[in-house]
Image: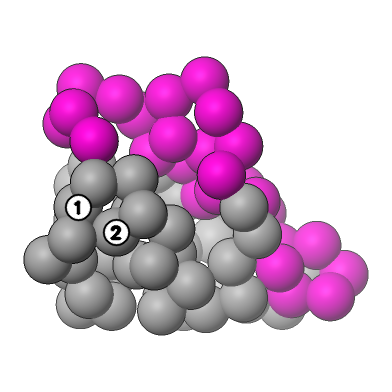
Amino acid sequence: MPTDQSVIIYPPAEDGGRRVRIGDHFVGIAYGLLDVAVLLQEAGLQDWDKMDVAGSALIEWRGGGPDQWKSS
């Protein structure tokens, strides 16, 4: 995945899932940091793990940061 593509994690839904978009494509629903890491790995960032996801400036978190998985 080229680093010039934006990664956006949308606010949590009622079930706690957050939509994940890379560039112009929605790539899945994440229910935790591990899910986000797997989606990014499938997009080409094989070495990423939960810590990379939580601390990356490449990811835009909407509706709460990496510790927010329940809807308000």
Q: What residue type is labelled 1?
A: Leu
Query: What is the number of the mark on residue 17?
Result: none
Classed neighbour count for the residue bearing mark 2: other residues with Cα under 10 Å, few (<14), some (14–19), many (≥20):
some
Could you tell me if residue 12 is visible in this image? Answer: yes
Could you tell me how far apart the alpha carbons at marks 2 and 1 are, in whole angstroms?
4 Å
Is the residue under label 1 in contact with that under label 2 (CB below 8 Å)?
Answer: yes
**Rendering coords of residue 43 (x, y %):** 34, 45
Classed neighbour count for the residue bearing mark 1: other residues with Cα under 10 Å, few (<14), some (14–19), many (≥20):
some
**Rendering coords of residue 71 (x, y %):** 77, 70
Q: How is the image coloured?
A: one colour
Q: Is residue 63 left or right of residue 43?
A: right
Res. 39 image quadrant? bottom left
Is the residue 32 above or below the residue 17 in the image? below
Query: What is the number of the mark on residue 45?
Result: 1
Query: Per the image, is 10 magenta?
Result: yes
Q: Quadrant of the N terminus?
A: top left
**Rendering coords of residue 70 (x, y %):** 71, 77
| Element assignment for label 2 | helix
Is the residue 45 above or below the residue 36 in the image? above
Label 2 sits on residue: 41
| Magenta span of residues | 1-27
